[in-house]
Image: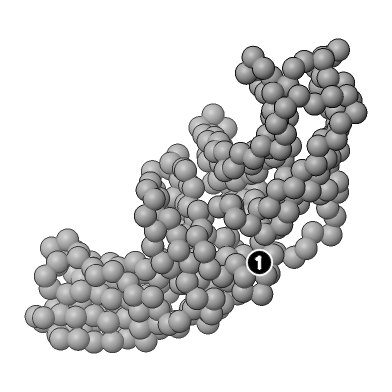
Amino acid sequence: MLGKMSSGLGFAAAATIVINLDAAPYGTKDVKISGGDTKETLSLYHTDDGISGMVRISAPKKVDHIGIKVEFLGIIECSTDKTPYEFASKVQELAAPGSLFGDEEFRFEFKTVDKPHESFRGMSATAKYVIRVTISRSAMSANVVQDQELWVQALQKEPEINNVIKMEVGIEDCLHIEFEYDKCKYHLADVVMGKIYFLLVRIKIKHMELAIIKRESVGSGQSMQTNSETVIKYEIMDGAPVKGETIPVRLFLESFPLTPTYPNVTNKFSVKYYLNLVLVDEEDRRYFKQQEVKLWRKNMDGAEASGTAC
């Protein structure tokens, strides 16, 4: 994976940096660039993988420096924080103080690096990992810094406890339903199976739909911000049900842009998912019930090593 060209303040024409990562063990991942529909391709790693590569620096003219280093960093950026938060850091020195002239290459390798969280790009929070190369200069000259982002996925073990979700809801003397989902924890390529039982129907239902809601929260206390997004809306019934009718639910998750649940990442942000059952009557009034479910990433033997991440 090739890094972008560097342009440091006051040093734009003096040198350029290219970061070339070695082939990642799980190939690459197409990731949406925040704030748009365009994508970029990043090297894909799991949490226990080492990272290595080559740094190439080109200096058409002699450039004095006080050291060159490469860092592996884990960074969280939130809309509620003015400065990024580093949750992982490792440093290697590439060169002692000296001078650069022409093209020079430096090999680096981080055999063991702490990657406790999965990469994430959301509406108001980002968790990312970067390789950062810095050419340090004197106080009179700006440093030259170049980042190369990579993507990390965190595989998880099968949950030991995964209970069925079963609940009765309704409006007194008008509507009474019982819904059941086969479990409360789903991996990202799983299928949501369930049933909706109509125990009492005295309102004219037009249709029923099941939605997946992603809720992203950043900050804490009074400064907490929460954003919700409907990932998918799926119609499971069209027409008026009758008492005693049962509607099956079968929702395949693999084709949707989902992430694992992030319960609380370093007290900075969290991401939760909900199954939202919605009934719409003939006057377009909506009746709904949300149920939180937890999503996790299963080892699919390479099946999840490609595609688009959100």
Judging depth in this view, the residue of 181 and 260 nearest the camera is 181
Q: Splitting the image into 4 quarters, where does residue 33 fall?
A: bottom left
Q: Splitting the image into 4 quarters, where does residue 30 fall?
A: bottom left
Q: Position of residue 231 (x, y in %)?
A: 57, 43
Judging depth in this view, the residue of 124 and 11 nearest the camera is 124
- Give the farthest residue toward the left: 61
Q: Position of residue 125 (x, y in %)?
A: 48, 47
Q: Secondary structure at mark 1?
A: loop
Q: Residue at x 61, y 74 (%)?
A: 302
Q: Position of residue 137 (x, y in %)?
A: 20, 71
Q: Residue at x 76, y 24 (%)?
A: 240
Horizontal relation, residue 8 to residue 112: left or right: left
- Residue type at mark 1: give it: Leu
Horizontal relation, residue 225 to residue 93: left or right: right
Residue 76 vertical placement versus 248 (above, below):
below
Q: Position of residue 217 (x, y in %)?
A: 56, 39
Q: Residue at x 60, y 67 (%)?
A: 304
Residue 243 vertical placement versus 90 (above, below):
above
Residue behind mark 1 = 155
- Give the farthest residue toward the front: 239
Q: Residue at x 34, y 75 (%)?
A: 2
Judging depth in this view, the residue of 245 and 305 nearest the camera is 245
Give neighbour class at mark 1: few <14, some 14-19, many 20+ (Cα, 10 Å).
some
Whether residue 122 can be seen here: yes
